[in-house]
């Protein structure tokens, strides 16, 4: 669901590229989706996305569960894309 929300946010930003505010809100929403760990952190940004960027993306963000956000973090850790800072320091 997180990936679908990202796709619809990007589509909304591209379609409404004449206006400035969908691009700004879209970039902020993408950053918030990347860093959020709970659904409560997404409420305000999902409403702004719903109103200004893309309706479908806003609804998807509002319907997300905590498991959708935490599973992504766990997958990144297991796949090794998250590097341990202490492991590679000299």
Image: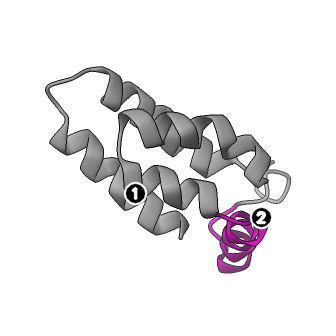
Question: In the orientation shown, which residue stands out farthest toward the right?
Answer: 86
- The percent coordinates of residue 51 (x first, y second) are 42, 36
Please tell me the numbered disc located at residue 79: none
- The percent coordinates of residue 31 (x first, y second) are 55, 40
Residue wearing tag 1? 56
Label 1 SS:
helix
Vertical position of residue 34 compared to residue 72: above or below? above
Residue wearing tag 2? 66
Q: Residue at x 67, y 73 (%)?
A: 80
Q: Which residues are magenta?
A: 64-82
How crowded is the residue under tag 2: few (<14 C-alpha within 10 Å), some, or many (20+)?
A: few
How crowded is the residue under tag 1: few (<14 C-alpha within 10 Å), some, or many (20+)?
A: some
Question: In the orientation shown, which residue stands out farthest toward the top?
Answer: 20
Vertical position of residue 19 compared to residue 31: above or below? above
The image quadrant of residue 57 is bottom left
Q: Nearer the viewer, residue 2 or 51?
A: 51
- The percent coordinates of residue 73 (x first, y second) are 72, 65
Q: Residue at x 48, y 50 (%)?
A: 58
- The percent coordinates of residue 59 (x first, y second) are 50, 56
Residue 70 forms part of the magenta stretch: yes
Label 2 SS:
helix
Among the two numbered marks 1 and 2 on one chain, the one whose residue lies closer to the N terminus: 1
Q: What secondary structure prevails in the magenta region?
A: helix
- Give the number of the mark in front: 1 or 2: 1
* Mark 1–mark 2 distance (CA, rounded to whole Å): 19 Å
Q: Nearer the viewer, residue 58 or 8?
A: 58
Q: Residue at x 31, y 49 (%)?
A: 10
């Amino acid at each position: 669901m997180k990936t679908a929300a990202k796709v619809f946010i990007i589509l909304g930003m591209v379609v409404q590229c004449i206006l400035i505010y969908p691009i700004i809100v879209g970039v902020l929403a993408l950053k918030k989706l990347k860093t959020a760990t709970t659904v409560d952190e997404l409420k305000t940004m999902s409403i702004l996305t719903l109103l200004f960027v893309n309706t479908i993306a806003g609804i998807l963000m509002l319907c997300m569960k905590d498991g959708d956000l935490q599973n992504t973090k766990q997958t990144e850790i297991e796949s090794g894309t998250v590097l341990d800072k202490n492991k590679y320091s000299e």
